[in-house]
Image (spheres, helix red, strand yellow):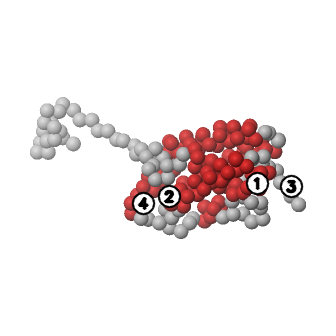
Amino acid sequence: MDITGGSNQILPNAKEANQYYYESAVTTRMAADFENLRREILKEVTQETIEELKYYITELPGTKPFEEKLTDGGFSEEKIEEATRLKELYRKRAQMYRNYPSAQQINLDLLSSIKNSFYTYIFPLIEEGAPLRTVMEQLREKIVLPTKELLNKNGMHDDKLRYNEDHIYGMIYYLTGMCHLNWTVYKKK
């Protein structure tokens, strides 16, 4: 580009020109999903639930009810009530955006990560008979805070899902209710 002369003169007093190339602010797959979600909502792009997500949002057969699972895991009645509220808080937020492909992918990624982290870091504590307080401290340290950091990093401009720590706990209890997480070791019959 000639900036110092000729008929396409842009900056007649410039001595040199610098060209800058900026990388997209989207640096991860999840960040791209958050950006795509915004566009999908504007254009009302929806779809049926993706197969992989159906696994997490369908209750697995032959398992105990939510409250009983938490009771078996040592939760008090008050903690069960709070867990129920948080599960519903997440469910309602996810339900609002359930038909948007990118929201489905974000939820799939989060639920999958939470389930796998739970069985990597938390369930071994449960198997060892760790007190519920220790289990909950590690749940926060190993799952809730890293998930919050992931959301803050990738969903920096998210103004739709806006998941916070309560929603993350809600995802954990939602997975419990769908029988993907156990809070005690059940003996097979």
Q: Is the residue marked by circle 2 packed among few (<14), some (14-19), or many (20+) residues within 10 Å? A: many
**Looking at the rendering, in which quadrant would you find the C terminus?**
bottom right
Q: Given this view, does label 1 or label 2 mark the residue nearer the observer?
A: 1
| Tag 4 near tag 1, CB within 8 Å | no
Q: Residues within 10 Å of mark 1 (few under 14, many from 20)?
A: many
Measure the alpha-carbon separation of dots 1 and 2.
31 Å
- Quarter of the view holding residue 41: bottom left
Which of the marked residues, 1 or 2, is nearer the chain's N terminus?
A: 1
Q: Position of residue 36 (x, y in %)?
A: 44, 56
Q: Residue at x 13, y 36 (%)?
A: 12
| Separation (CA) of disc 4 from disc 2 | 10 Å
Q: Mark 2 falls on what kind of element?
A: helix
Say which label, 2 or 3, has the lower sequence index.
Answer: 2
Pick whichever of labels 4 and 2 is earlier in the sequence: 4
Q: Secondary structure at mark 1?
A: helix
Q: CA distance from mark 4 to mark 1?
A: 37 Å
Label 1 is placed on what type of residue?
A: Lys
- Mark 4 or 1, nearer chain start: 4
Question: Nearer the observer, disc 3 or disc 1?
Answer: 1
The three-letter code of the residue at mark 4 reads Ile
Nearer the observer: mark 4 or 1; the answer is 1
The mark found on residue 187 in the picture is 3
User: For mark 1, what is the residue?
Assistant: 69
Task: Using the image, tell me which numbered label, if any, was put on residue 102.
Answer: 2
Q: CA distance from mark 3 to mark 1?
A: 13 Å
Residue 5 position in % (x across, y down): 12, 39
